[in-house]
Image: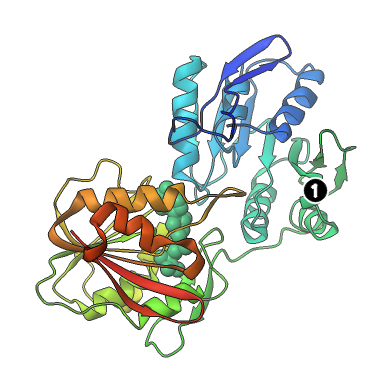
């Protein structure tokens, strides 16, 4: 596979843009034709400088870097990885510093223009549009973008219902723009939380919009719940990629002596985990919640147990590099004899990956069914 272009050359300007984390031989670009389309469109409007521009869901910071040269940019995203990528790209290109908000923060006041990379998740889109509707004046233009094939009639209905009058552009390089105004007849209040009970367990889970598997329990997590350890000698546990915290809640019940650290790159996932642990577990001072890329910056040899139901895609791209990074990081932070417990679809080949890292004799199969396998690697 050829290496991705890192130079965005557009309208006589040049930006250098990297994904985060930066990888050697990265095959995926840090921006897409949707970013280019929105940049070209806005530049053609010849707007004055020094506008307050709010950018939602900028993936790796292409839009923030571009528009911060001459404007005051606020970048709002649920993703720690996107925040980090944007921060690095702003530094690299020496554009003006910007304000960072996560998707549960309030929409800032006095916004002149809103640009949106339309998220895949309709609950997040609905939440973001309802927040915009409550705050924007109807004069403030909102311009959103996505692949044309991802903009369905139902997507436009969400825009109409939760924000206001909506039009679309012609397609350019398979992308389409959506133009919208905050003028819907009524402001629909949207509850950001969905709650459901977990079968066979004595707790329920609350889920903010962008939390992984926020509508129902992940099948892997369901299987994992039946095989989590209870061990009085375990002092500290990391739930790596905690999502709504389902595994942490169960681990906390099974290991009342253990300190548990929930790690995720989604701020909404961490906020959900916090709510769920608070309502299921009486004492709350043995929990930490950390937004991070895998276990970057964690102390080595400091933890007894890491549990992980790894992600297998980033944005829209299917990838196993995050799982691999998680396994490598877990090995670093585990004490000698510490354990990493991982669940994965059978076809993902995690047993080979773990054997390469820990040696084959240190990797045991704890359980399997027709779809999943649970593996334990001992350091
Ligand atoms: C398959 S989900 C598992 C969620 C939950 N533990 C469960 O079992 O239902 C994987 C989680 O990893 C998180 N994640 C993805 N990339 C990450 C990264 N680089 N660092 C930390 N967490 C990440 C995702 O946000 C997601 O919540």
| Residue occupying image coordinates x 77% and y 41% | 138
Residue 316 in percent (x, y) is at 62, 49
Q: Which residue is mark 1?
A: 183
Which of 162/215 is in front? 215
- Give the quadrant of the C terminus: bottom left
Which of the 4 quarters of the picture holds residue 181?
A: top right
Residue 5 in percent (x, y) is at 60, 24
Residue 342 in percent (x, y) is at 35, 66
Q: Is residue 235 left or right of residue 308?
A: left
Q: Is residue 234 visible?
A: yes
- Give the quadrant of the N terminus: top right
Residue 272 in percent (x, y) is at 43, 64
Q: Is residue 266 visible?
A: no
- Residue 103's place in the image compared with 212, above or below, is above
Which of the 4 quarters of the picture holds residue 338?
A: bottom left
- Residue 272's place in the image compared with 292, above or below, is below
């Amino acid at each position: 596979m050829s290496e991705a272009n890192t130079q965005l050359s557009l309208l006589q300007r040049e930006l250098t843009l990297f994904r985060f984390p930066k990888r050697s031989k990265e095959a995926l670009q840090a921006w897409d034709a949707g970013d280019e389309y929105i940049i070209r469109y806005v530049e053609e409007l010849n707007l004055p400088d020094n506008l307050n521009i709010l950018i939602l869901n900028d993936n790796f910071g292409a839009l923030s870097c571009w528009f911060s040269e001459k404007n005051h940019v606020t970048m709002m995203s649920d993703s720690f990885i996107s925040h980090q990528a944007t921060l690095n790209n702003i530094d690299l290109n020496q554009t003006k510093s910007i304000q960072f908000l996560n998707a549960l923060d309030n929409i800032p006041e006095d916004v002149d223009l809103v640009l949106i990379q339309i998220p895949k998740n309709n609950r997040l889109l609905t939440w973001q549009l309802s927040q915009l509707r409550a705050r924007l004046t109807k004069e403030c233009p909102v311009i959103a973008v996505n692949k044309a094939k991802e903009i369905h009639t139902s997507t436009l209905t969400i825009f109409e219902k939760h924000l206001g009058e909506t039009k679309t552009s012609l397609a350019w390089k398979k992308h389409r723009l959506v133009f919208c105004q905050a003028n819907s007849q009524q402001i629909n209040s949207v509850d950001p939380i969905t709650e459901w009970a977990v079968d066979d367990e004595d707790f329920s889970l609350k889920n903010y919009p962008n939390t992984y598997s926020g509508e129902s329990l992940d099948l892997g997590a369901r299987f994992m719940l039946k095989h989590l350890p209870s061990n009085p000698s375990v002092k500290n546990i990391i739930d790596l990629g905690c999502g709504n915290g389902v595994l942490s809640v169960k681990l906390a019940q099974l290991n009342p002596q253990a300190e548990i650290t929930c790690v995720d790159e989604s701020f909404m996932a961490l906020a959900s985990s916090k709510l769920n642990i608070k309502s299921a577990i009486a004492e709350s001072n043995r929990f930490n919640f950390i937004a991070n890329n895998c276990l970057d910056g964690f102390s080595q040899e400091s933890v007894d147990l890491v549990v992980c139901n790894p992600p297998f895609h980033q944005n829209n791209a299917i990838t196993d590099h995050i799982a691999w990074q998680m396994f490598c990081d877990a090995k670093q932070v585990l004490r000698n004899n510490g354990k990493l417990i991982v669940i994965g679809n059978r076809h993902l080949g995690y047993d080979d990956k773990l054997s390469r890292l820990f040696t084959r004799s240190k990797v045991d199969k704890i359980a399997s069914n027709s779809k999943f396998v649970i593996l334990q690697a001992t350091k």
